[in-house]
Image: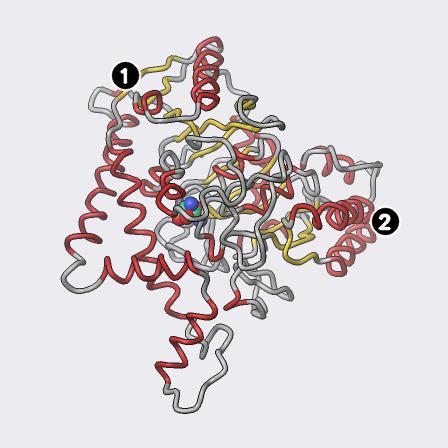
Amino acid sequence: MSTACLTIQETADAVSTGQCSARDSIQSALDRADALNPKLNALLQTLHEPAIRAATEQDNRRAAGDPMPPLAGVPIVIKDNMCLQGSRTTCASKILANYESPYTATALEKLIVAGAIPIAKTNLDEFAMGSSGENSAFEPTKNPWDPSRVPGGSSSGSASAVASRIVPGALGSDTGGSIRQPAAFCNLVGFKPTYSTVSRYGLVAFASSLDQIGPLTRTVEDAALLYHAISGSDPLDSTASPHPITNPLTNLHHPIDNLRIALPSVARTHTNHPAVTRALEHTIKALTNLGAEIIEVDLPTLDHAISAYYLIAPAEASSNLARFDAIRYGVRAEPKKGDDLFDLYANSRAQGFGPEVQRRIMLGTYALSAGYYDAYYRRACKVRRLVKQAFDNLFQPTNPSLACHAVLMPTAPHPAWQIGSLADDPLAMYLEDYYTVAANLAGLPAISLPAGFCHDTADHPLPVGVQLIAPAFAD
Ligand code: GLN
Protein backbone atom coordinates (compact mmCIF):
# COMPACT_ATOMS: atom_id res chain seq x y z
CA MET A 1 0.00 0.00 0.00
CA SER A 2 1.41 3.44 -0.90
CA THR A 3 1.28 5.82 2.01
CA ALA A 4 2.52 8.86 0.06
CA CYS A 5 -0.88 10.50 -0.25
CA LEU A 6 -2.15 9.65 3.23
CA THR A 7 -2.51 12.20 5.99
CA ILE A 8 -1.16 11.56 9.48
CA GLN A 9 -4.59 10.42 10.65
CA GLU A 10 -5.01 8.10 7.64
CA THR A 11 -1.53 6.63 8.06
CA ALA A 12 -2.16 6.02 11.77
CA ASP A 13 -5.50 4.38 10.91
CA ALA A 14 -3.94 2.19 8.20
CA VAL A 15 -1.25 1.00 10.62
CA SER A 16 -3.57 0.49 13.59
CA THR A 17 -6.05 -1.57 11.54
CA GLY A 18 -3.26 -3.66 10.03
CA GLN A 19 -3.84 -2.51 6.42
CA CYS A 20 -0.19 -1.55 6.41
CA SER A 21 2.66 -2.47 8.75
CA ALA A 22 4.63 0.24 10.51
CA ARG A 23 7.68 -1.06 8.68
CA ASP A 24 6.08 -0.65 5.25
CA SER A 25 4.92 2.85 6.11
CA ILE A 26 8.41 3.88 7.24
CA GLN A 27 10.20 2.11 4.40
CA SER A 28 8.03 3.81 1.80
CA ALA A 29 8.75 7.24 3.35
CA LEU A 30 12.48 6.46 3.33
CA ASP A 31 12.23 5.40 -0.33
CA ARG A 32 10.54 8.69 -1.21
CA ALA A 33 13.22 10.56 0.74
CA ASP A 34 15.96 8.79 -1.23
CA ALA A 35 14.22 9.48 -4.54
CA LEU A 36 13.27 13.14 -3.98
CA ASN A 37 15.94 14.59 -1.74
CA PRO A 38 18.62 14.86 -4.44
CA LYS A 39 16.25 17.30 -6.24
CA LEU A 40 14.99 19.20 -3.21
CA ASN A 41 17.83 19.18 -0.65
CA ALA A 42 15.17 19.17 2.07
CA LEU A 43 16.91 16.63 4.31
CA LEU A 44 20.34 16.96 5.90
CA GLN A 45 20.40 13.47 7.35
CA THR A 46 18.18 10.42 6.94
CA LEU A 47 17.75 8.01 9.82
CA HIS A 48 17.25 4.74 7.95
CA GLU A 49 18.46 2.32 10.57
CA PRO A 50 16.88 3.71 13.74
CA ALA A 51 13.61 4.41 11.89
CA ILE A 52 13.32 0.84 10.57
CA ARG A 53 14.28 -0.51 14.00
CA ALA A 54 11.54 1.53 15.71
CA ALA A 55 8.96 0.44 13.12
CA THR A 56 9.90 -3.23 13.50
CA GLU A 57 9.53 -2.94 17.28
CA GLN A 58 6.05 -1.49 16.81
CA ASP A 59 5.08 -4.33 14.46
CA ASN A 60 6.39 -6.89 16.95
CA ARG A 61 4.39 -5.28 19.72
CA ARG A 62 1.29 -5.44 17.58
CA ALA A 63 1.95 -9.11 16.75
CA ALA A 64 2.23 -9.81 20.49
CA GLY A 65 -1.18 -8.22 21.01
CA ASP A 66 0.18 -5.20 22.94
CA PRO A 67 -1.62 -1.87 22.59
CA MET A 68 -0.16 0.47 19.94
CA PRO A 69 0.42 4.19 20.55
CA PRO A 70 -1.91 6.49 18.55
CA LEU A 71 0.62 7.64 15.94
CA ALA A 72 2.35 4.26 15.47
CA GLY A 73 3.95 3.94 12.04
CA VAL A 74 3.60 7.65 11.17
CA PRO A 75 6.82 8.93 9.55
CA ILE A 76 7.85 12.48 10.45
CA VAL A 77 10.81 14.78 9.84
CA ILE A 78 12.41 17.18 12.29
CA LYS A 79 14.01 20.56 11.70
CA ASP A 80 17.71 20.19 12.37
CA ASN A 81 17.73 22.66 15.26
CA MET A 82 16.05 20.10 17.53
CA CYS A 83 18.04 17.45 19.34
CA LEU A 84 17.44 13.77 18.73
CA GLN A 85 19.77 11.53 20.70
CA GLY A 86 21.97 9.49 18.41
CA SER A 87 21.81 11.97 15.53
CA ARG A 88 23.66 15.13 14.60
CA THR A 89 22.02 18.52 15.24
CA THR A 90 23.74 20.94 12.87
CA CYS A 91 21.38 23.94 12.75
CA ALA A 92 22.57 24.00 9.11
CA SER A 93 25.74 25.67 10.37
CA LYS A 94 29.36 24.77 9.75
CA ILE A 95 30.06 25.51 13.39
CA LEU A 96 27.86 22.57 14.48
CA ALA A 97 28.55 20.30 11.49
CA ASN A 98 29.76 17.48 13.77
CA TYR A 99 27.62 18.11 16.82
CA GLU A 100 25.97 14.97 18.24
CA SER A 101 22.72 15.49 20.15
CA PRO A 102 23.34 14.47 23.77
CA TYR A 103 19.60 14.01 24.43
CA THR A 104 16.21 14.30 22.72
CA ALA A 105 14.11 17.48 22.69
CA THR A 106 11.00 17.14 24.87
CA ALA A 107 8.56 17.93 22.01
CA LEU A 108 10.16 15.25 19.88
CA GLU A 109 10.29 12.78 22.77
CA LYS A 110 6.54 13.26 23.28
CA LEU A 111 5.94 12.63 19.59
CA ILE A 112 8.03 9.46 19.69
CA VAL A 113 6.12 8.26 22.77
CA ALA A 114 2.92 8.88 20.78
CA GLY A 115 4.29 6.46 18.16
CA ALA A 116 5.57 8.78 15.40
CA ILE A 117 8.92 7.79 13.88
CA PRO A 118 11.49 10.41 12.82
CA ILE A 119 12.99 9.46 9.47
CA ALA A 120 15.16 12.54 8.81
CA LYS A 121 16.49 15.87 10.09
CA THR A 122 15.61 18.76 7.79
CA ASN A 123 17.48 21.66 6.23
CA LEU A 124 16.91 25.21 7.48
CA ASP A 125 18.35 28.69 7.37
CA GLU A 126 21.45 28.62 9.56
CA PHE A 127 20.31 28.78 13.21
CA ALA A 128 16.77 29.46 11.87
CA MET A 129 17.75 32.96 10.71
CA GLY A 130 16.14 33.65 7.37
CA SER A 131 12.95 33.52 5.34
CA SER A 132 13.97 31.45 2.35
CA GLY A 133 16.16 28.49 3.28
CA GLU A 134 19.03 30.08 1.35
CA ASN A 135 21.07 30.81 4.49
CA SER A 136 21.81 27.12 5.06
CA ALA A 137 25.53 26.29 5.14
CA PHE A 138 24.55 23.10 3.29
CA GLU A 139 22.95 24.58 0.14
CA PRO A 140 19.40 25.91 -0.25
CA THR A 141 16.27 23.77 -0.22
CA LYS A 142 13.98 23.87 -3.29
CA ASN A 143 10.23 24.45 -3.38
CA PRO A 144 8.53 21.29 -4.72
CA TRP A 145 5.89 23.44 -6.49
CA ASP A 146 8.64 25.10 -8.53
CA PRO A 147 12.22 24.01 -7.83
CA SER A 148 13.61 27.33 -9.13
CA ARG A 149 11.94 29.02 -6.15
CA VAL A 150 12.53 29.09 -2.40
CA PRO A 151 10.28 27.02 -0.13
CA GLY A 152 10.30 29.81 2.48
CA GLY A 153 12.17 29.66 5.74
CA SER A 154 13.57 29.08 8.06
CA SER A 155 11.80 25.66 8.30
CA SER A 156 12.58 25.20 4.60
CA GLY A 157 13.34 21.48 4.60
CA SER A 158 10.37 20.58 6.83
CA ALA A 159 7.99 22.38 4.44
CA SER A 160 9.59 20.94 1.31
CA ALA A 161 9.49 17.38 2.71
CA VAL A 162 5.79 17.57 3.64
CA ALA A 163 4.76 19.32 0.40
CA SER A 164 6.62 16.75 -1.70
CA ARG A 165 4.87 13.98 0.25
CA ILE A 166 7.99 12.40 1.64
CA VAL A 167 6.17 12.52 5.00
CA PRO A 168 2.71 13.69 6.11
CA GLY A 169 4.02 15.91 8.92
CA ALA A 170 7.05 17.73 10.30
CA LEU A 171 8.18 19.75 13.28
CA GLY A 172 9.46 23.25 12.63
CA SER A 173 10.29 26.19 14.86
CA ASP A 174 8.84 29.68 14.58
CA THR A 175 10.59 32.74 16.02
CA GLY A 176 9.17 35.30 13.60
CA GLY A 177 7.26 33.23 11.04
CA SER A 178 9.46 30.25 10.25
CA ILE A 179 6.66 27.69 10.39
CA ARG A 180 3.88 29.82 8.87
CA GLN A 181 5.70 31.43 5.95
CA PRO A 182 7.17 28.19 4.50
CA ALA A 183 3.75 26.59 5.02
CA ALA A 184 2.22 29.40 2.92
CA PHE A 185 4.88 29.01 0.20
CA CYS A 186 4.32 25.23 0.01
CA ASN A 187 0.50 24.98 0.34
CA LEU A 188 0.62 23.56 3.86
CA VAL A 189 -0.91 24.17 7.25
CA GLY A 190 1.70 25.69 9.58
CA PHE A 191 0.87 26.29 13.22
CA LYS A 192 2.80 28.37 15.73
CA PRO A 193 1.33 27.59 19.16
CA THR A 194 0.92 30.02 22.06
CA TYR A 195 4.37 30.77 23.51
CA SER A 196 5.04 28.34 26.37
CA THR A 197 2.57 25.60 25.39
CA VAL A 198 5.33 23.51 23.80
CA SER A 199 8.57 22.88 25.67
CA ARG A 200 11.70 24.40 24.13
CA TYR A 201 14.01 21.93 25.89
CA GLY A 202 16.32 20.52 23.23
CA LEU A 203 15.54 23.26 20.69
CA VAL A 204 18.75 25.18 19.94
CA ALA A 205 17.85 28.70 21.03
CA PHE A 206 17.70 31.56 18.52
CA ALA A 207 15.60 34.15 20.42
CA SER A 208 14.35 32.46 23.58
CA SER A 209 11.42 34.80 24.28
CA LEU A 210 10.03 34.23 20.76
CA ASP A 211 10.95 30.65 19.75
CA GLN A 212 8.14 28.05 19.56
CA ILE A 213 8.08 24.54 18.12
CA GLY A 214 5.05 23.60 16.02
CA PRO A 215 3.73 21.36 13.23
CA LEU A 216 3.71 21.63 9.42
CA THR A 217 1.12 19.33 7.86
CA ARG A 218 -1.21 19.05 4.90
CA THR A 219 -4.46 19.26 6.92
CA VAL A 220 -5.68 21.19 9.94
CA GLU A 221 -6.67 17.93 11.65
CA ASP A 222 -3.08 16.68 11.35
CA ALA A 223 -1.72 19.94 12.75
CA ALA A 224 -4.08 19.51 15.72
CA LEU A 225 -2.95 15.89 16.18
CA LEU A 226 0.73 16.83 16.25
CA TYR A 227 0.14 19.85 18.47
CA HIS A 228 -1.83 17.73 20.90
CA ALA A 229 1.02 15.21 21.03
CA ILE A 230 3.84 17.75 21.61
CA SER A 231 2.22 20.30 23.95
CA GLY A 232 2.13 20.38 27.73
CA SER A 233 4.27 21.28 30.70
CA ASP A 234 7.86 20.13 31.08
CA PRO A 235 9.97 20.14 34.25
CA LEU A 236 13.03 20.63 32.00
CA ASP A 237 11.79 23.99 30.62
CA SER A 238 10.82 26.51 33.28
CA THR A 239 9.06 28.63 30.65
CA ALA A 240 6.75 25.77 29.62
CA SER A 241 3.28 26.65 30.89
CA PRO A 242 1.55 24.55 33.56
CA HIS A 243 -1.76 25.86 32.06
CA PRO A 244 -3.79 22.76 31.03
CA ILE A 245 -3.98 22.52 27.23
CA THR A 246 -7.41 21.76 25.77
CA ASN A 247 -7.38 19.09 23.10
CA PRO A 248 -7.66 21.08 19.85
CA LEU A 249 -9.23 18.08 18.11
CA THR A 250 -12.44 18.50 20.14
CA ASN A 251 -13.08 21.96 18.63
CA LEU A 252 -12.24 21.20 15.02
CA HIS A 253 -15.75 20.91 13.63
CA HIS A 254 -17.47 23.74 15.48
CA PRO A 255 -19.61 26.01 13.29
CA ILE A 256 -18.08 29.47 12.92
CA ASP A 257 -21.24 31.54 12.58
CA ASN A 258 -20.73 33.21 15.94
CA LEU A 259 -17.15 34.27 15.24
CA ARG A 260 -16.03 37.89 15.00
CA ILE A 261 -12.86 38.13 12.98
CA ALA A 262 -10.78 41.30 12.92
CA LEU A 263 -9.23 42.34 9.63
CA PRO A 264 -6.49 44.97 10.05
CA SER A 265 -7.03 47.58 7.29
CA VAL A 266 -3.29 47.59 6.71
CA ALA A 267 -3.62 44.03 5.37
CA ARG A 268 -5.54 45.54 2.45
CA THR A 269 -3.36 48.63 1.93
CA HIS A 270 0.12 47.10 2.41
CA THR A 271 2.01 46.41 -0.81
CA ASN A 272 0.96 42.80 -1.31
CA HIS A 273 1.33 40.80 -4.48
CA PRO A 274 -2.07 40.91 -6.29
CA ALA A 275 -2.48 37.14 -5.82
CA VAL A 276 -2.09 37.62 -2.05
CA THR A 277 -4.76 40.33 -2.04
CA ARG A 278 -7.06 38.10 -4.10
CA ALA A 279 -6.55 35.17 -1.71
CA LEU A 280 -7.32 37.44 1.25
CA GLU A 281 -10.53 38.79 -0.33
CA HIS A 282 -11.55 35.27 -1.26
CA THR A 283 -11.02 34.12 2.33
CA ILE A 284 -13.07 37.04 3.65
CA LYS A 285 -15.92 36.02 1.34
CA ALA A 286 -15.68 32.34 2.31
CA LEU A 287 -15.69 33.15 6.05
CA THR A 288 -18.61 35.56 5.60
CA ASN A 289 -20.56 32.88 3.71
CA LEU A 290 -19.99 30.53 6.63
CA GLY A 291 -21.55 33.13 8.91
CA ALA A 292 -18.50 34.77 10.49
CA GLU A 293 -18.53 38.51 10.97
CA ILE A 294 -15.50 40.35 9.55
CA ILE A 295 -14.70 43.67 11.20
CA GLU A 296 -12.11 45.99 9.72
CA VAL A 297 -9.85 47.38 12.47
CA ASP A 298 -6.80 49.60 12.86
CA LEU A 299 -3.63 47.74 13.82
CA PRO A 300 -0.94 50.36 13.16
CA THR A 301 1.46 48.52 15.45
CA LEU A 302 2.19 46.04 12.64
CA ASP A 303 4.50 48.64 11.06
CA HIS A 304 6.45 48.92 14.30
CA ALA A 305 6.40 45.19 15.05
CA ILE A 306 8.81 44.40 12.24
CA SER A 307 11.34 47.01 13.50
CA ALA A 308 11.02 45.79 17.09
CA TYR A 309 11.42 42.16 16.01
CA TYR A 310 14.63 42.89 14.10
CA LEU A 311 16.13 44.42 17.26
CA ILE A 312 14.86 41.95 19.86
CA ALA A 313 15.53 38.75 17.88
CA PRO A 314 19.16 39.65 16.99
CA ALA A 315 19.76 40.92 20.55
CA GLU A 316 18.68 37.58 22.01
CA ALA A 317 20.56 35.70 19.27
CA SER A 318 23.79 37.55 20.02
CA SER A 319 23.56 36.38 23.60
CA ASN A 320 22.39 32.80 22.83
CA LEU A 321 25.06 32.23 20.19
CA ALA A 322 27.86 33.37 22.50
CA ARG A 323 28.11 29.76 23.69
CA PHE A 324 29.55 28.69 20.33
CA ASP A 325 33.08 29.61 21.27
CA ALA A 326 34.88 26.58 19.81
CA ILE A 327 35.81 25.52 23.35
CA ARG A 328 32.53 24.27 24.77
CA TYR A 329 30.71 23.96 21.43
CA GLY A 330 31.61 24.36 17.83
CA VAL A 331 34.20 23.53 15.24
CA ARG A 332 37.60 24.98 16.19
CA ALA A 333 39.70 26.96 13.71
CA GLU A 334 43.25 25.72 13.12
CA PRO A 335 45.37 27.87 15.50
CA LYS A 336 48.12 29.93 13.85
CA LYS A 337 51.46 30.62 15.48
CA GLY A 338 51.09 33.42 18.04
CA ASP A 339 47.31 33.18 18.29
CA ASP A 340 45.90 33.87 21.73
CA LEU A 341 42.53 32.76 23.15
CA PHE A 342 40.73 35.73 21.64
CA ASP A 343 42.10 34.88 18.19
CA LEU A 344 40.87 31.32 18.62
CA TYR A 345 37.34 32.53 19.44
CA ALA A 346 37.32 35.12 16.66
CA ASN A 347 38.74 32.87 13.94
CA SER A 348 36.52 29.93 14.84
CA ARG A 349 33.38 32.08 14.86
CA ALA A 350 34.34 33.89 11.66
CA GLN A 351 34.84 30.58 9.89
CA GLY A 352 31.96 28.74 11.52
CA PHE A 353 29.10 31.25 11.18
CA GLY A 354 27.68 32.28 7.81
CA PRO A 355 27.16 35.94 6.78
CA GLU A 356 23.52 36.30 7.96
CA VAL A 357 24.29 34.85 11.40
CA GLN A 358 27.29 37.18 11.72
CA ARG A 359 25.10 40.12 10.71
CA ARG A 360 22.52 39.25 13.39
CA ILE A 361 25.20 38.84 16.07
CA MET A 362 26.66 42.24 15.20
CA LEU A 363 23.25 43.96 15.07
CA GLY A 364 22.22 42.36 18.36
CA THR A 365 25.48 43.14 20.13
CA TYR A 366 25.20 46.75 19.00
CA ALA A 367 21.58 47.06 20.19
CA LEU A 368 22.57 45.70 23.62
CA SER A 369 25.77 47.67 24.06
CA ALA A 370 26.17 50.37 26.72
CA GLY A 371 25.00 53.68 25.32
CA TYR A 372 22.68 52.11 22.75
CA TYR A 373 20.68 49.76 24.98
CA ASP A 374 18.07 52.39 25.88
CA ALA A 375 17.79 53.77 22.37
CA TYR A 376 17.36 50.41 20.66
CA TYR A 377 16.76 47.35 22.82
CA ARG A 378 14.71 48.95 25.58
CA ARG A 379 12.65 50.93 23.08
CA ALA A 380 11.99 47.79 21.05
CA CYS A 381 10.75 46.07 24.23
CA LYS A 382 8.33 48.97 24.79
CA VAL A 383 7.04 48.57 21.25
CA ARG A 384 6.62 44.87 21.91
CA ARG A 385 4.36 45.70 24.84
CA LEU A 386 2.27 48.00 22.60
CA VAL A 387 1.93 45.25 20.00
CA LYS A 388 0.63 42.93 22.72
CA GLN A 389 -1.75 45.63 24.02
CA ALA A 390 -3.16 46.22 20.52
CA PHE A 391 -4.09 42.53 20.29
CA ASP A 392 -5.48 42.59 23.86
CA ASN A 393 -7.73 45.51 22.86
CA LEU A 394 -9.19 43.39 20.06
CA PHE A 395 -9.56 40.18 22.06
CA GLN A 396 -10.56 41.67 25.46
CA PRO A 397 -12.02 45.14 24.85
CA THR A 398 -13.70 47.04 27.69
CA ASN A 399 -17.06 46.18 26.13
CA PRO A 400 -16.95 42.35 25.98
CA SER A 401 -19.67 42.18 23.31
CA LEU A 402 -17.14 43.74 20.90
CA ALA A 403 -14.50 41.07 21.50
CA CYS A 404 -12.95 39.50 18.41
CA HIS A 405 -12.11 35.79 18.31
CA ALA A 406 -9.31 36.00 15.77
CA VAL A 407 -7.35 38.33 13.51
CA LEU A 408 -7.09 37.58 9.78
CA MET A 409 -4.16 38.66 7.59
CA PRO A 410 -2.06 37.30 4.76
CA THR A 411 0.80 35.09 5.91
CA ALA A 412 3.33 36.82 3.63
CA PRO A 413 3.14 39.77 1.22
CA HIS A 414 4.39 37.69 -1.74
CA PRO A 415 4.36 34.09 -2.93
CA ALA A 416 7.68 32.18 -3.17
CA TRP A 417 10.42 34.10 -4.96
CA GLN A 418 13.18 32.88 -7.28
CA ILE A 419 16.19 31.41 -5.50
CA GLY A 420 18.84 34.13 -5.30
CA SER A 421 16.57 37.06 -6.13
CA LEU A 422 16.60 38.58 -2.61
CA ALA A 423 19.88 37.09 -1.46
CA ASP A 424 21.75 40.43 -1.76
CA ASP A 425 19.06 42.50 -0.11
CA PRO A 426 18.69 41.46 3.54
CA LEU A 427 16.33 44.34 4.28
CA ALA A 428 13.89 43.27 1.55
CA MET A 429 14.02 39.75 2.96
CA TYR A 430 13.31 41.05 6.50
CA LEU A 431 10.24 42.93 5.20
CA GLU A 432 8.79 39.65 3.94
CA ASP A 433 8.15 38.88 7.65
CA TYR A 434 5.79 41.86 7.94
CA TYR A 435 2.71 39.81 8.82
CA THR A 436 4.23 37.05 10.92
CA VAL A 437 6.43 38.65 13.60
CA ALA A 438 3.64 40.33 15.60
CA ALA A 439 2.23 36.98 16.82
CA ASN A 440 5.67 36.03 18.17
CA LEU A 441 6.18 39.39 19.89
CA ALA A 442 2.76 38.99 21.56
CA GLY A 443 3.20 35.24 22.26
CA LEU A 444 -0.07 34.42 20.45
CA PRO A 445 -1.08 31.28 18.55
CA ALA A 446 -1.13 31.77 14.77
CA ILE A 447 -1.84 29.45 11.88
CA SER A 448 -1.17 29.70 8.16
CA LEU A 449 -3.75 28.01 5.93
CA PRO A 450 -3.64 27.27 2.20
CA ALA A 451 -5.68 29.95 0.40
CA GLY A 452 -5.29 29.27 -3.30
CA PHE A 453 -2.67 29.74 -5.97
CA CYS A 454 -0.97 32.53 -7.84
CA HIS A 455 -1.07 31.96 -11.60
CA ASP A 456 0.28 35.42 -12.54
CA THR A 457 4.01 35.25 -12.74
CA ALA A 458 5.11 31.68 -12.97
CA ASP A 459 5.02 28.67 -15.25
CA HIS A 460 4.05 26.74 -12.15
CA PRO A 461 1.15 27.81 -9.94
CA LEU A 462 2.47 29.14 -6.63
CA PRO A 463 0.65 28.57 -3.33
CA VAL A 464 -0.59 31.51 -1.25
CA GLY A 465 -1.48 31.36 2.46
CA VAL A 466 -3.61 33.33 4.89
CA GLN A 467 -3.08 33.59 8.61
CA LEU A 468 -5.35 33.58 11.65
CA ILE A 469 -4.06 34.84 15.01
CA ALA A 470 -6.00 34.01 18.18
CA PRO A 471 -5.90 34.95 21.88
CA ALA A 472 -3.26 33.26 24.04
CA PHE A 473 -4.19 29.67 24.94
CA ALA A 474 -7.03 29.61 22.35
CA ASP A 475 -4.89 27.32 20.25
N1 GLN B 1 12.44 35.17 9.02
C1 GLN B 1 12.58 35.51 10.40
C2 GLN B 1 14.03 35.76 10.73
O1 GLN B 1 14.86 35.58 9.89
C3 GLN B 1 11.99 34.46 11.27
C4 GLN B 1 12.85 33.29 11.52
C5 GLN B 1 12.23 32.26 12.40
O2 GLN B 1 11.04 32.31 12.69
N2 GLN B 1 13.06 31.35 12.88
O3 GLN B 1 14.35 36.15 11.82
| Quarter in which the C terminus is drawn | top left
Give neighbour class at mark 1: few <14, some 14-19, many 20+ (Cα, 10 Å). Answer: few
Q: Is disc 2 placed on a helix, strand or loop?
A: helix
In this rendering, the answer to whether 213 lies above or below 452 is: below
**Residue 353 at x, y percent in the picture:** 45, 65
In this rendering, the answer to whether 289 lies above or below 124 is: above
**Residue 171 at x, y percent in the picture:** 56, 47
Q: Which residue is mark 2?
A: 63
Along the line of sight, which residue is nearer the eye, 294 or 141?
141
Q: Which of label 2 and label 1 is nearer to you? A: 1
For the point 43% across and 34% down, which residue is it? Answer: 446
Left/right placement of residue 414 relative to residue 73 reads left
For the point 48% across and 37% down, which residue is it? Answer: 180
For the point 53% across and 66% down, which residue is it? Answer: 94
In this rendering, the answer to whether 161 lies above or below 53 is: above
Along the line of sight, which residue is nearer the eye, 289 or 14?
289
| Quarter in which the N terminus is drawn | top right
Left/right placement of residue 43 relative to residue 350 reads right
Q: Which picture quadrant has residue 163? A: top right
Q: Which residue is mark 1?
A: 401
User: Is the C-beta of the residue carrying label 2 under 8 Å from the nearest atom of ligand 1?
Assistant: no
Q: Which picture quadrant has residue 195? A: top left
Q: Is disc 1 placed on a helix, strand or loop?
A: helix
Q: Is residue 132 visible?
A: yes
Q: What amino acid does circle 2 point to?
A: Ala
Give the mark, 2 or 1, whose residue is nearer the N terminus. 2
Left/right placement of residue 6 relative to residue 463 reads right
Way the structure is coloured: secondary structure
**Residue 285 at x, y percent in the picture:** 46, 11
Q: What amino acid does circle 1 point to?
A: Ser
How many numbered dots are placed on residues in this image?
A: 2
**Residue 394 at x, y percent in the picture:** 28, 26
